[in-house]
Image (tube, helix red, strand yellow):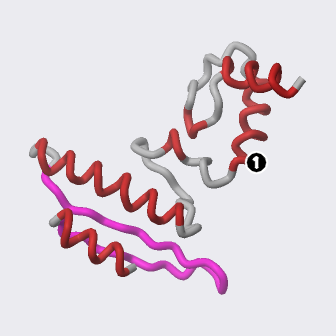
Amino acid sequence: MLSVKEDKLVFKFDFFVELIVESQRTVIALFGVFFDPNDLEETERARVWYKDIHSKMNEEGYIAYRETSTSTSEALNGNPLLKDLLSRIKKALDENGTLAPGRYGISKHEDIMRAEKDVS
């Protein structure tokens, strides 16, 4: 949490952190960042902050349980085995790769085909 506090000083945002005790082993941290979406400079700082904190949390092993449209393409980077499994299921169900290509970081059809040729 210290790095989040330091980030607030660097990026100059008002924010809140809400901790939700989900179970004996699970705590969910929600971060709210307040900025003016009509201010292009502030919006860009918010985007940079989001990518930065998302990356830091992943590096520490705190994987997001719910992603935003900003981060869905990287959603499964912390779990390559699940990413591979879901990519293969998507290929089986969507042979032409037309449904939500690249969503959630699941490989595009061409990437799956290329990977399968490399393994063969």
Magenta-colored stretch includes residue 29: yes
Q: In the rendered image, which quarter is residue 31 located in?
A: bottom left
In this rendered view, identify the residue nearer to me: 30 or 84. Answer: 84
Q: Residue at x 85, y 28 (%)?
A: 119
Of the 4 image quadrants, the one containing the N terminus is bottom left
Please state if 21 lies on the left or on the right of 79 as rendered. Answer: left
Q: Amino acid at mark 1?
A: Leu
In this rendered view, identify the residue nearer to me: 45 or 39. Answer: 45
Rendered view: 52 above or below 89: below
Please give the range of residues in magenta: 13-36
Magenta-colored stretch includes residue 63: no
Q: Residue at x 41, y 69 (%)?
A: 30
Of the 4 image quadrants, the one containing the C terminus is top right
Residue 90 in percent (x, y) is at 73, 29
Residue at numbered disc 1: 81
Residue 104 in percent (x, y) is at 57, 40
Report crowding for label 1: few under 14, some 14 to 19, many 20 or more residues within 10 A (C-alpha): few
Q: Residue at x 16, y 47 (%)?
A: 37
Rendered view: 75 above or below 26: above
